[in-house]
Amino acid sequence: MTDDLRRLVYYSRNRTVGAPEAVDATIRAILATSRTNNARVGVTGALMFNAGCFAQVLEGPSDAVEATFERIQQDERHGDVSLLAYEAVATRLFTDWSMAYVGASKAEADRYGDVADTSGFDIARMTGDRLCAVLHGLALEEEAAVAA
């Protein structure tokens, strides 16, 4: 890979409002735009969304990752954007995903709800490395489920 490869991990509070169908349509639009833009500039990663927050990993050249993150910070659908990690990396974890999306299925929502309820899960307390590992694991699980 290049000497300029960076990984950025953040979370933000969801400010998307409306009926569940409208929120779902908004998330689908975000993903479609992200996938197109990210593929064009060499950014890969994963996005997790639930009613309370977004969590995302971005990987790619520093200028592309920084420009993408700047757009996210200016997006009214994101509130309280919190950078957890921004670092140089030797290789990508998300090589095959211009933007993997995890946590969308009912089973995943139920599982995350249980984790939150039983463990006191608080995304604000996660490190960048831990959140990156969670998203990577979920993206691999999602890929395996689709392939099955």
Image (cartoon, rainbow, N blue to C red):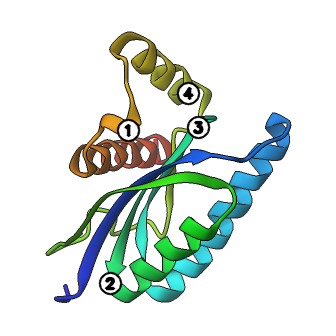
Circle nearer the N terminus (3, 1): 3
Front position in the image: 58 or 17: 17
Residue found at the very far front of the displayed protein:
80
Q: Mark 3 highlights which residue?
A: 50
Task: Tell me if 21 is positioned left or right of 113 in this view.
Answer: right
What is the C-alpha distance between the residues marked 4 and 1? 19 Å
* Mark 1 element type: helix
Disc 1 crowd, CA 10 A, few/some/many (<14, 14-19, 20+): few
Q: Mark 1 highlights which residue?
A: 124
Disc 4 crowd, CA 10 A, few/some/many (<14, 14-19, 20+): some
Q: Are marks 1 and 2 in contact (CB under 8 Å)?
A: no
In front: label 1 or label 2:
1
User: Residue at point 24% right, 81% down?
Assistant: 5
Circle nearer the N terminus (1, 2): 2
In front: label 3 or label 1:
1
Front position in the image: 82 or 28: 82
In front: label 4 or label 2:
2
Instruction: Please name the amino acid that badge 1 sits on.
Output: Ala
Circle nearer the N terminus (2, 3): 3
Q: Are marks 3 and 4 in contact (CB under 8 Å)?
A: yes
Circle nearer the N terminus (4, 2): 2
Instruction: Please name the amino acid that badge 2 sits on.
Output: Ser
User: Residue at point 43% right, 49% down?
Assistant: 143
